[in-house]
Image (cartoon, coloured by chain):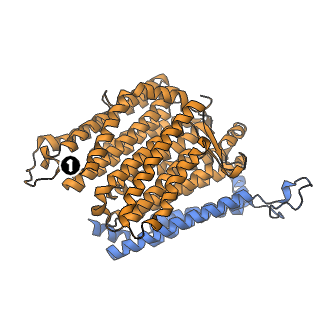
């Protein structure tokens, strides 16, 4: 049973998605409880899976009994299991959050919406677990197609944003496929574990460099890395409020995780291609993204746009950590990835509550609700602490480890980039708080009612998680050090 | 330089891949009509799929089905089936994306009454 668990975790949302049109044909309102129940089971399953992996070692799963180089292999190792817990719990919170927002944002398309969310989550599970480069491509595309549809599902401005995302995302996916076919032509295998043994003899090959470059650009488009980020802010800002938390917290981070898998698990991390160390390239792009993303966020007036650009800068910070090539930096990067997924979810939950309940889209309007919104301002303070990276929150310990890793590698430009990005983040949150506390704008006389329970729950749980990740940072970092490090490190 | 050029001409398949890819990219970037952008996207998909087929092509090879289990397997007489399987999957993925893209185009046309990117952006503001 326990060795089937990774496949079950993938099949659970998939089967729920497939059976939903049949079950909910007559009873549209059943779709919400069914999705919540499915994802609750998935959260429990992923925790059980993490427990198994920590105690009994990684689980290797081979489909329909074909042995490794021929069949498709999935591996639930420490890193994948930790990310699965994160993925399923954020998906669960996202679906809980959807309950009260859905009538306003989605109209009559609630059943379609839940089907797409479940498909997206099962595809992301596939990306996390897959150890086959082509399998990774297929799941990436399933996730991408569901997210194009999820962004466009409510119509309106989002349609055009979704179309742009589709054009960009498809270009990225097929560049990745081109890279994969280069590597396949070079090594004759698609399995990551099998490829590791064959690559060391082929390091001087031009095809390897070309393939890696195409894969990096392709995944860079998927993870909204700075020169390729143009699709991301509009798509997330105009997406329905119930959709953007799940997309913003998971989609780009899982693409980043796929790149981490390729760099550390397939290639040896210290590989030098044509005089350029690959990891240095990753760190330089990360530094660019961290600074440029944060300065673009400073220029925004729309709350969701600002948060989306903030997400771009945090992708950069994670890449800086990953690119240092030592244990401290790697663990810091992965720990920051966990934090950032939670923080992005919290930010977009907050933006969703602000719009659905209070009708706020713009930072100038935020002061108008003032003291009537204790949950909104309270969670915003905690998220801001986390985003800027102040001590009681997880964001601080992530950045701390990344900076330690960069110092250990003697990479002072990276340290400067992290610090500069932190200052810029502080600047745009100060701008937000100015809107709330200075209250220059005229007050509205409207009395807002109590916010729904599920809004309170999602805001409360994500804010608590940001603090808890900080308080329990040393056991979590220890867990990552023990179980999530790449082999030969 | 000339040698490199001649070496490229020796491999017309890969030259075709590059031409189709760049052509598709050019259409995607320069055309304002959304359906034309989708056509460019489809050309890019086709070029990558063509590359996959090209690297697995073999002269005089047959389908990879073993006729007897006793004789040793001669790998040279069989075509490699794996890139073809990848090709099929990639085609399915591409068609699904194209379907979603056309559905979005239809919805955009219903809402804005135009498929021209500039006109839509004007109406958005």
Q: At 34% from the left edge and 77% from the top edge, which residue is drawn?
A: B113
Q: Which chain carries label 1?
A: A
Q: How crowded is mark 1: few (under 14 residues within 10 Å), some or many (20 or more)?
A: many
A347 lies left or right of A132: left
Residue A469 lies in quadrant: top left
A297 lies left or right of A197: left
Q: The orange chain is which one?
A: A
Q: Nearer the viewer, residue A14 or A83?
A: A14
Q: At 50% from the left edge and 67% from the top edge, which residue is drawn?
A: B27
Q: Which percent across, then down, holds residue A293?
A: 36, 44
Chain B color in figure = blue
Quadrant in which the C terminus of chain A appears: top right
Q: At 41% from the left edge and 49% from the top edge, which residue is drawn?
A: A91
Spot the residue most to the right: B71
Is residue A452 in sight in this rendering?
yes
Quadrant in which the N terminus of chain A appears: top right
Is residue A165 in sight in this rendering?
no
Q: Which of A86 and A295 is in front in this view?
A: A86
Q: What element carries label 1?
A: loop
Q: At 35% from the left edge and 32% from the top edge, which residue is drawn?
A: A468
A48 lies left or right of B125: right
Seen in the picture, residue A461 relative to A18 is either above or below; the reply is above
Seen in the picture, residue B63 relative to A418 is either above or below; the reply is below
A450 lies left or right of A150: left
Q: Which percent across, then down, holds residue A378?
A: 22, 39
Residue A402 lies in quadrant: top left
Disc 1 target residue: A363
């Amino acid at each position: 049973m326990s060795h089937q668990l990774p496949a079950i975790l993938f099949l659970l949302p998939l089967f729920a998605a497939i059976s939903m049109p049949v079950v909910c044909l007559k009873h549209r309102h059943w779709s919400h409880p069914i999705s919540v129940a499915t994802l609750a089971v998935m959260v429990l399953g992923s925790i059980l899976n993490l427990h198994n992996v920590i105690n009994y070692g990684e689980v290797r799963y081979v489909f329909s009994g074909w042995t490794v180089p021929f069949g498709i292999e999935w591996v639930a190792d420490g890193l994948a299991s930790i990310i699965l817990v994160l993925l399923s719990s954020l998906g669960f919170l996202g679906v809980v959050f959807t309950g009260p927002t859905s009538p306003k944002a989605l109209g009559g398309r609630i059943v379609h919406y839940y089907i797409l969310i479940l498909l997206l989550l099962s595809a992301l599970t596939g990306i996390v677990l897959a150890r086959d480069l082509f399998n990774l491509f297929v799941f990436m595309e399933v996730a991408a197609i569901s997210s194009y549809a999820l962004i466009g599902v409510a119509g309106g401005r989002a349609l055009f944003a979704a179309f742009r995302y589709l054009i960009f995302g498809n270009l990225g996916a097929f560049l990745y496929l081109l890279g994969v076919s280069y590597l396949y032509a070079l090594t004759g295998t698609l399995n990551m574990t099998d490829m590791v043994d064959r690559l060391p003899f082929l390091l001087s090959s031009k095809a390897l460099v070309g393939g890696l470059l195409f894969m990096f650009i392709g995944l860079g488009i998927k993870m909204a890395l700075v020169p390729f980020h143009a699709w991301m802010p509009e798509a997330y800002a105009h997406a329905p409020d119930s959709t953007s938390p799940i997309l913003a917290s998971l989609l780009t981070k899982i693409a980043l995780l796929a790149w981490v898998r390729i760099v550390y698990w397939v290639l040896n991390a210290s590989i030098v291609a044509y005089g350029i160390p690959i990891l240095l390239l990753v760190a330089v792009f990360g530094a660019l993204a961290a600074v440029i993303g944060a300065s673009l966020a400073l220029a925004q007036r729309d709350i969701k746009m600002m948060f989306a650009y903030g997400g771009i800068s945090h992708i950069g910070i994670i890449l800086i950590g990953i690119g240092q090539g030592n244990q401290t930096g790697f663990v810091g990067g992965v720990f920051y990835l966990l934090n950032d997924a939670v923080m992005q979810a919290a930010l977009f939950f907050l933006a969703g509550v602000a719009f659905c309940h209070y009708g706020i889209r713009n930072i100038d309007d935020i002061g108008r609700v003032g003291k009537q919104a204790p949950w909104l301002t309270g969670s915003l303070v905690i998220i801001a602490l986390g985003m800027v990276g102040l001590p009681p929150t997880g964001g601080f310990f992530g950045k701390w480890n990344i900076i330690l890793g960069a110092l250990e590698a003697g990479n002072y430009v990276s340290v400067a980039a992290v610090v500069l990005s932190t200052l810029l983040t502080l600047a745009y949150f100060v701008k937000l708080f100015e809107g709330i506390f200075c209250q220059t704008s005229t007050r509205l006389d409207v009395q807002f009612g109590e916010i729904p329970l599920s809004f309170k729950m999602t805001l409360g749980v994500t804010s608590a998680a940001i603090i808890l990740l900080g308080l329990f940072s040393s056991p979590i970092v220890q867990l990552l050090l023990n179980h999530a490090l790449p082999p030969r490190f | 330089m000339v040698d490199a050029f001649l070496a490229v001409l020796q491999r017309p398949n890969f030259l075709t891949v590059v031409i189709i890819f760049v052509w598709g990219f050019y259409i995607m970037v320069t055309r304002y009509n959304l359906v034309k952008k989708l056509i460019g996207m489809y050309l890019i998909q086709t070029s990558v799929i063509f590359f996959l087929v090209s690297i697995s092509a073999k002269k005089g090879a047959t389908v990879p089905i073993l006729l007897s289990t006793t004789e040793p397997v001669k790998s040279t007489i069989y075509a490699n089936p794996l890139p073809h399987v990848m090709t099929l999957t990639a085609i399915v993925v591409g068609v699904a994306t194209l379907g979603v893209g056309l559905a979005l185009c239809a919805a955009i046309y219903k809402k804005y009454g135009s498929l021209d990117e500039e006109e839509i952006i004007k109406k958005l503001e």
